[in-house]
Image (cartoon, grey):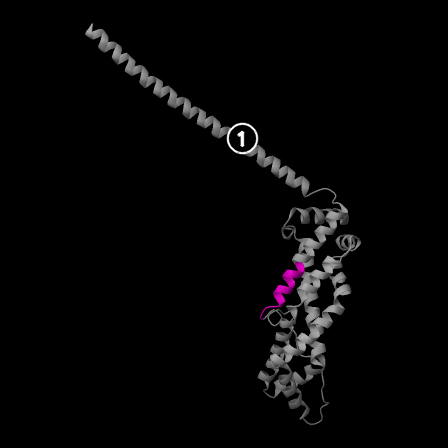
Amino acid sequence: MWQFFCLTKLNTHKMKKINILTSSLALILFANLNANAQIKLSDIFKKVTEKQSTTTATGTPTTFEIGQGIKEALQLGVSAGADRLSVKDGFLGNLAVKILMPPEAQKVEKTLRGIGLNKLCDNVITSLNRAAEDAATEAKPIFISAIKQMTLADATNILLGNNDAATAYFKRVTTSELMQKFSPIVTTSLNKVNATKYYSDLTSQYNRLPLVKPVNTNLTEYVTQKAIDGLFIEVAKEELKIRGNFNARSTTLLQKVFGYADKKKS
């Protein structure tokens, strides 16, 4: 009897172990199946999302989407361009927009450098560029305002126009206001950075030389125009970037709108 009891106890213990082992294997199997299911579901969701994204970024945009896409692109472009120019060395360190001596003073510069007055010439050039950098801080709000006032027809013409269509639009609608805004800022800045004094010293030195024709320049007008020209050069760079560089189209809307333009032009 005792032997039967012990044997029964042993068998029961073994059965418990078997049940525990079976349950553990079942749990592991279920977990693996669940993980595989999650991976498959994840793959499905990923493919659906990619398909939706591709579909959204292609096709023919509505007139409203064209308007919004162009405004988004131009806002990014003018902000980047204005920000680059409105910091120290934004003009001075950029050969494409650096302001040199006024044309009528370039002979003056050459003559004075020839007699060792390099520092005086360098001071004038540096101060002219510093004045333009100050003025450039006022450019962004003017450009943004022009973008907000843009019509849907303007946006479509820009999208399907020449590679400088947006820059041409800005020149047409902002130049007058930029001149009005920049002029007093440039005047103040020219005095602040001693540009007026440096230029006066430079022309005085030159005008003392025998047999030279006196030079007079309206520095405010010259620097204001050069500052505006520099802004448009930077805006044109940004326009070319977003038209020609797919990676610069940072949103689905930009990809759709400019992808449509690419197809229309090809």
Q: What residue is shown at x 55% (from left), y 31% (from top)?
A: 41
> As shown in the figure, which amino acid type bears the numbered disc 1?
Lys
Q: What residue is shown at x 22% (from left), y 11% (from top)?
A: 6
Q: Mark 1 points at which residue?
A: 40
The x, y position of residue 66, in whole percent, is 74, 49
Q: Residue furthest top?
A: 1
Q: What residue is shown at x 45% (from left), y 27% (from top)?
A: 32
The x, y position of residue 157, in whole percent, is 79, 54
Q: Is 110 drawn above or below residue 43 in the view shown?
A: below
Instruction: Report the front residue among 28 and 120.
Output: 28
Instruction: Report the front residue among 159 and 15.
Output: 15
Q: Is 250 drawn above or below residue 96 in the view shown?
A: above
The x, y position of residue 189, in whole percent, is 63, 77
Which region is colored magenta? 77-88
Circle 1: element type: helix
Query: Does 82 lie within the magenta span?
Result: yes
Most common SS among magenta residues? helix
Instruction: Indicate left or right for 37 with 257 as reference.
Output: left
Q: What residue is shown at x 71% (from left), y 69% (from top)?
A: 229
The quadrant of the rendering that contains the N terminus is top left
Q: Is 147 drawn above or below residue 92 in the view shown?
A: above
The x, y position of residue 251, in whole percent, is 64, 49
Q: Residue furthest right?
A: 153
Say few, some or many: other residues with alpha carbon within 10 Å of mark 1 (under 14 / 14 to 19 / 20 or more). few
Among the 4 quarters of the image, the one containing residue 108? bottom right
Q: Count how many numbered circles sit on residues in the image.
A: 1
Among the 4 quarters of the image, the one containing residue 101? bottom right
